[in-house]
Image: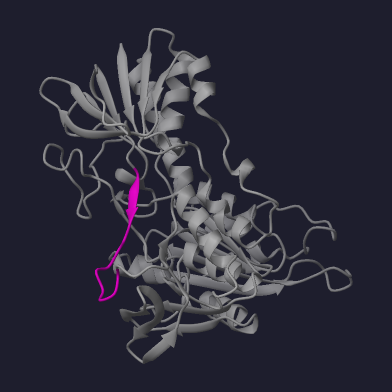
Amino acid sequence: MKTVIVGANHAGIAAANTLLDNYKDQQVVMIDSNTNLSYLGCGTALWVGRQIDSYENLFYTNKEAFEAKGARISLETSVTSIDFANHVVHCQKADGTCFDETYDKLVLATGSLPISPKLPGCDLEGISFLKLFQQGQEVDRWMSRDDVRSVAVIGAGYIGVEIAEAAKRRGKEVRLFDIAPTSLASYYDPSFTAVMDKNLADHGIECHFGERVVAYHGENGRVSAIEAEKGTYPADLVINAIGFIPNNELGRDHLELFSNGAYHVDRRQRTSDPDVYAIGDCATVWSNALNAETYIALATNAVRSGIVAGHNIGGTRLDSIGVQGSNGISIFGYNMVSTGLSVAAATRAGLDVCHADYEDLQRPGFMRENASVKIRIVYERESRRVVGAQMASTEDISMGIHMFSLAIEEGVTIDKLKLLDIFFLPHFNQPYNYITMCALGAE
């Protein structure tokens, strides 16, 4: 059995490892247009902001590791087209050499592409994106220049907020733009984002929310300012972090697509072509909060989808258990984590939800080290099942969100959490735990 995997980042790597480690009858071929694989892009801002020493450890595997397992891997190789009828992948190397790969099963792990609005001036030098390792290198080089004093970040999602922090840590004047009224609006409700917005402002980041960027301006071919709806602002470097779209170029004319262009897959990662699987950011996922197919581009989802596809190709049936979209962020020491749906997201999806809020100290008041914790639990009004949770604190409260992720996956109701057996020790928490108290406050 020969499996060709197009794309060798998180999803493709997970699929390849699953096949190579568990199914010895598998011949695995990996193809990727990049010069490297396994780059942890979530660490780019830490590296650019000099919160870690270097980028080397942001790569967790390499070409040689897969060749040692028996895979054949071609980097700096583009797939020009796919003959789905005859099971042939047409490839071209960086030097122009062309070759074909036949397949029994094909895995599309082509990921996503950054949204790139064609605004006036978009071809100016000094306008960067942030996804690939090479783009991180480019941003880092710009940050190191003395003549780059003002940085504009467009998009206040996770990547935008993180790189804005990084730029500020590098001593730059930073402006952060988004058409949404707050930062992180896709993940958190306003009572949470308001605290993050203040955190950003308190650390010197100039926030321009509810303000669309309409053009780039330049001098001598290089960006010098951005024009937004409420004014024009200096910018020696612009970083676009608006979001991503599925990279469906190779299969969009052959495979069934989701509303946003992602490949529609079943719970075994199979596309509408029974010999083609799609994994990672180019494919849909099943949301346990929505009880429906959706699109959530996260590295953790990519890895799980690769494992599922690998086992099914290898001959072991494995259905995806679905996802919650669990995520987290830490900016200037303020930590926020969420899973499932916010109230706003649930309402947009047509769910009738309620929510319970609570805020308290992490530990009893007599403890020297302490901090406030905010929590919100979102649940369906009629069924009372938990569909989302948000938590925030300067404390590391991140592990708590995993419990809520499991609760959503298992359809747990808000009432089940009211008397949940949660241990107490002053070093860790309060006798009246904020999770319990929040659940007790539900309608």
Along the viewing direction, whichever of 261 and 119 lies nearer the viewer: 119
Q: Is residue 353 left or right of residue 337?
A: left
Q: Is residue 153 left or right of residue 79?
A: right
Q: Is the magenta stretch mostly helix, strand or loop?
A: loop
Residue 428 falls in which quadrant of the image? bottom right
Write down the region rendered in magenta. Answer: 111-122
39 up-or-down from 269: above or below? below
**Number of numbered labels in the structure image:** 0
| Residue at x 42% of width, y 41% of height | 302
Q: Nearer the viewer, residue 400 or 9?
A: 9
Q: Please identify the quarter of the rendering in which residue 322 is found.
A: top left
Is residue 5 something one can see in this rendering?
A: yes
- Place of residue 248 in the rendered image (x, y in percent of width and height, measured from the top left): 23, 44
Pick the residue in front: 170 or 326. 170
Residue 284 seen in this snapshot: no
Report the quarter where the N terminus lies.
top left
Give the percent coordinates (x, y) of residue 45: 57, 59
Q: Nearer the viewer, residue 122 or 131?
A: 122
Residue that protrudes farthest toward the bottom in the picture:
230
In magenta stretch: residue 22: no
Q: Where is residue 55 in the image (x, y as percent from the top left)?
A: 61, 47
Left or right: where does residue 42 sit relative to residue 227? right
Q: Is 200 above or below relative to 51?
A: below
* Residue drawn at x 12%, y 20% as measured from the top left: 86
Q: Which colour scheme is used?
A: one colour
**Residue farthest to the top, as pictured:** 25
